[in-house]
Each structure stands twice: as C-alpha cells, then as structure tokens.
Image: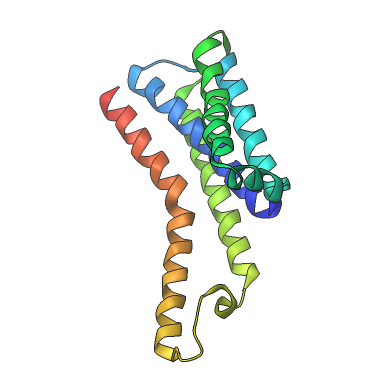
Amino acid sequence: MLRRTLPTLVQLVGMVTVITAAPAIAAGEAMSVSAGALVSALVLVAVILALGLWPEKTFGALAGPRWKAAVIAPLSLALIVAPTILLRQELLAAPAGPSLAAGAVVLLAGVFWDLVLVRREARDLDQDMLLTPWDGAAERDRRRRGVAWAERIRLLMIPTVTAVMAAVFLLLG
C-alpha cells in the first residue's frame, strides 16, 4: 500500500506548489511559504503515510463505531488546515513563475510514476470484479472497461483539480 501512496504524495507536493505560486503570479509578487503552510503540508504527509503504512489500523479506526469517524475525520482536517491559518510567519520567498513550473513538473512526475506502477501491476481484473458464474464474456468485458475508466479518472484527479484551481487563481487574482 505504501508503494501506491508515494506517487500521490509527490503529486500533492506539486499540487501545493502550483496552487501556492498561481496567486502570486496573478498578483505579480514572489511566492511566499508560511510556517503554517509548511506545518500543514507535513501533517498532510503524515496522514497519507499513516494510511499507506498502516491501512488496517487507520481505516479500521474509521470503520468502527460511527462516533470515531465523526471525531477523527474533522480532527484530522482541522490539524491540516489550522496551522495555515494560525502560523503566518513567512519562511520562504521564491520567484512565482519558476516555482509554478517546478510544481507542474513534480506533479507530472508523480502522475507518470503512478501510471508506471499501474502498468507494472498487470493484475487479473477478473479477480477484482464481482462476477457471477453465468456472466458472459460481454459482461466481463463491460466491467473490465469500467475498471479501466475508474483507474484513468483516479490518475487524472489531482492534475485536473490542480489545473482548475491554478486557473481560477490566475484569472481571479
């Protein structure tokens, strides 16, 4: 699970860099990274690594009594967002244009890495799909195409959200 999580972390680093640089480009300023943004990014990485390293424990905690999920999910979100709001001291300033370009390269590298992992796994889709003994080849092919489309959508989710957010920031300033 961790091997499949690392490309997502790389994509998120690129995403955060792009969406941090885009408003700075629109404003004609240098990109600024605050202490809170760095802490928030580190907490997000920790959460994702926990999901990748200990999926049974982390997902198991959420799958238990509903009150656990009702407490853990918002608390995790608060721990990710609060530092950005509370710790505004600037740690780093960088040129926005090159930062956006570097973020885009990192994002695409993460997507490419994820794509390579998907291609290498060459799993037997028949074991992943719910099929009945009387399902024919046409039904199996239809479900296989559905799984393939779902995988493509997953691969494009972070780059698409990043592009939309960056475009909004660039257009609206």
Which of the 4 image quarters holds residue 142?
A: bottom left
Of 73 and 143, the residue lying toward us: 73
Residue 41, position as x, y percentages in the image: 59, 28
Quarter containing the C terminus = top left
Name above or below for residue 21 compared with residue 115: above
Query: Which residue sits furthest right?
Result: 53
Of 150 and 57, the residue lying toward us: 57
Residue 137, position as x, y percentages in the image: 44, 90
Q: Is residue 92 visible?
A: no
Residue at left 37%, top 34%?
166
Residue at left 46%, top 24%?
96
Residue 168 in the figure: left or right of residue 116? left
Which of the 4 image quarters holds residue 165?
A: top left
Q: Is residue 111 visible?
A: yes
Residue at left 59%, top 64%?
118
Residue 20 in the figure: left or right of residue 122? left
Name above or below for residue 137 compared with residue 68: below
State the scheme by which the image is colored: rainbow
Residue 127, position as x, y percentages in the image: 59, 77
Residue at left 32%, top 28%?
170
Quarter containing the N terminus = bottom right
Residue 117, position as x, y percentages in the image: 63, 61
Residue 54 in the figure: left or right of residue 62? right
Name above or below for residue 58 compared with residue 152: above
Query: Which residue sits furthest left?
Result: 172
Residue 146 in the figure: left or right of residue 45? left
Of 65 and 19, the residue lying toward us: 65
